[in-house]
Image: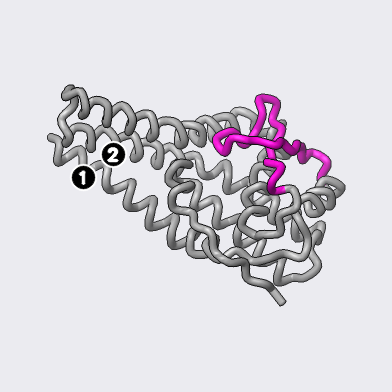
Amino acid sequence: MKILLIILCTIPILAGMVVANLFGFRLLYKPQELSVDLESILEVLVKKYPKLNYEFRKRAWAGTPLTNQGVAIVEEKFRHSKSSKDVARQLIRVSLSGLWNDYEKLIRWRVKYVKMGYILPSLTMLGAVLGIVVGRVPAMWAIVIIGLAIASCICSLWFSRAVEKEAATQIATLIERARPLNRLSEEEALIASIHAWTWVNILPGVAISFMMKEAPTKSLD
């Protein structure tokens, strides 16, 4: 029984990691430097599409991309970022705010699973470790429990990916229309990063934080 559960857990975990790496991490590991920062890009996009609603906060938890009113939360440290990786991730949040009035229930559904991806694996792992320490949970069952938690998060994030994919498509289209960047190559790099994040985000947030590594920015000159 335990072996069967481990196998069942392993399938979505491996599938999620492979897909996230092939279509997401490989691009985001090499962020490119834009000539325009996030704040300037947002100003241009809002003029073109006023439904976008965002606010800068000094501290923001990655597990809460939007407020309960549908306002995108952008961390202050990214205000002047020119990294295609960081700008793209924040633009997806802002795009969700633009879809809020029409798809509030779906966006809340997606946000719930994003939060779960940060909380559930961590709490499950903590509980399993404590169970092993006090001798209440056998090590093998602890592995099964942790695997089930991670696998369930990946499945939930994968099934709700369509919401984020729509947001990515909408903001990419808006970028193409508004032309907030100086060069076409920058626009293509940013849009590619936006779509890459929709694949990376099928993994729980805690896993993304662990797997995402910094790399020197590459100029487009």
Q: Which amino acid does the dot numbered 2 rest on?
A: Gly
In the displayed structure, would residue 59 be above or below residue 218?
above
| Location of mark 1 (residue) | 7
Relative depth, front residue between 152 and 87:
87
Task: Name the image quarter holding the N terminus.
Answer: top left
Residue at the far right in the pictured view? 47
**Main secondary structure type of the part rendered in magenta:** loop
In the displayed structure, would residue 1 be above or below residue 216?
above
Quadrant of residue 63 in the image? Answer: top right
Task: Name the image quarter holding the C terminus.
Answer: bottom right
**Helix, strand or loop for disc 2:** helix
The range drawn in magenta is: 49-78
In the displayed structure, would residue 88 be above or below residue 117?
below
Residue occupying the point 83% across, 41% down: 50
| Location of mark 2 (residue) | 147
**Helix, strand or loop for disc 1:** helix
Image coordinates of residue 115 in percent, x first then y, are 51, 32
